[in-house]
Image: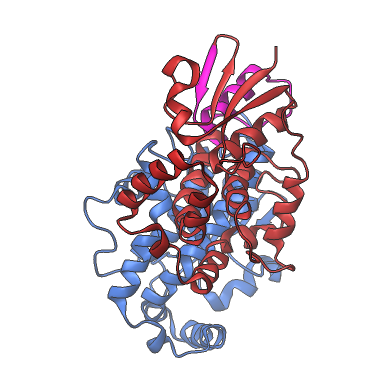
Chain colours: A red, B blue
């Protein structure tokens, strides 16, 4: 039976942008398992699966329910040990948690500053209200004010990617010769930004852009 | 037969501080193999092993010669597959290269700014000359000028450690429940700084300090 992934969407249900949902979708795609996605706006998350979900991504696989993209990846490797691995083992899973902390603390806050108002603008009206209230409270500023000073933030973003760019000089992926879950963690953050950026996020000769495009091309999508 | 590691030293041969030598020594200690170190000043590196070494750490194990701390760790896991693992497998080795790139680009430049003159001051005279010439050329500034503005740099250092600190909220080591080579990579950078800092690098309640001390306590030393 095909797995079902609840996936965040905008007013246009084909607009999918959540960084953590992308991490989960890339993990599903990597394992080559059949899955379908259910477009889910922010204010409908609490209605998923009889109210069992608090966040998306939320994976339903028969009787199993897994939320959190990282846990989904660990689940997939455990369920399909013979498929293409997302991790090498427990130490590698732990090390990927460092990568997640790096992406979440070094990249995501800059991305929020670049596109938080764009995210708001693609949401349906009730979701816009929810998003503005929760985000402005967390950010302690109006969305419009958060998203100012793009040039400086882009420079900071380019600089924040230095560890990845430096590593790419010696191997094509964080996972080595092929992407693994550690790559998808960082990819999710960039895909989120790329979903909204109507400006060049990375220079055309940046190795990070080639890395991003190579991973993006491997996504097989749901069914 | 015991392995021999050539290890950078100051004028006082007991002063050992190289971040990459510490990475290698922690890897040797982790594997529980017998090893001895040879105190090697900067200007004597070219005399090691009949001129075969260009850098330290440089490991001599019977007929094998391995330079570069990362390669030493990979070698040790290959030679002693049944001992405590430094990596889970090829994907984990690759992911550790991201950690190395992170430490080398996000931490080490700040550390240089904090203690480069202190490093110079512990070297023997010919090494001081070599160190000043090569470093001032690379840094395009006098050592004395590089090492200014400590408070701002310490703040930047604390901030640069955010990914590690964030991860430590959910697990005690980058390797999970026990340190692995990814931890030793970052530890090497901090040990280097700690070898010279006559000031508090980290607040006493910083989880990074507890992590550092826990790893530091595991070092068994050479023999």
List x then y, in percent, for residue B152: 31, 74
Q: Position of residue B61 (x, y in %)?
A: 65, 49
The question of residue A84 being in magenta is answered with yes
Judge whether B184 appears above or below B201 on screen: above
- Tell me what residue is drawn at x 74 percent, y 58 percent: A210
Q: Is residue B75 positioned above or below A152 on the image?
A: above
Quarter of the image with the N terminus of chain B is top right
Q: Which percent across, then down, holds residue A35?
A: 69, 23
Q: Is residue A93 left or right of residue A88?
A: left
Q: Is residue B28 visible?
A: no
Q: Nearer the viewer, residue A198 or A77?
A: A198
Residue A168 forms part of the magenta stretch? no
Q: Is residue B125 visible?
A: yes
Q: B159 and B67: which one is in front?
A: B159
Give the residues in magenta: A64-92
Question: Left of A106 or right of it: where is B57?
Answer: right
| Residue at the spot 30% in from the left edge and 68% down from the top edge | B197
Q: Residue at x 28, y 59 (%)?
A: B202
Foreground: B90 or B127? Answer: B90
Residue that appears at 49% across and 38% down: B175
């Amino acid at each position: 039976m095909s797995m079902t992934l609840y996936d965040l969407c905008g007013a246009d249900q084909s607009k999918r942008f959540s960084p953590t949902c992308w991490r989960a979708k890339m993990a599903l795609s990597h394992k080559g398992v059949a899955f379908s996605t259910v477009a889910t706006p922010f204010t409908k998350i609490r209605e998923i699966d009889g109210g069992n979900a608090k966040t998306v991504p939320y994976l339903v696989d028969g009787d199993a329910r897994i939320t959190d993209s990282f846990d989904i990846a660990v689940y997939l490797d455990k369920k399909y040990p013979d498929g293409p691995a997302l991790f090498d083992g427990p130490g590698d899973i732990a090390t990927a948690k460092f990568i997640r902390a790096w992406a979440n603390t070094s990249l995501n806050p800059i991305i929020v500053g670049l596109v938080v108002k764009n995210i708001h603008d693609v949401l349906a009206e009730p979701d816009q209200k929810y998003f503005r209230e929760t985000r402005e409270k967390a950010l302690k500023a109006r969305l419009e004010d958060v998203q100012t000073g793009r040039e400086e933030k882009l420079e900071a973003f380019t600089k924040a990617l230095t560890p990845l760019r430096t590593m790419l000089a010696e191997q094509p992926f964080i996972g080595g010769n092929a992407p693994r879950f550690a790559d998808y963690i960082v990819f999710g953050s960039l895909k989120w930004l790329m979903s909204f950026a109507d400006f060049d996020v990375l220079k055309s000769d940046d190795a990070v852009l080639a890395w991003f495009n190579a991973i993006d091309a491997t996504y097989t999508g749901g069914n």
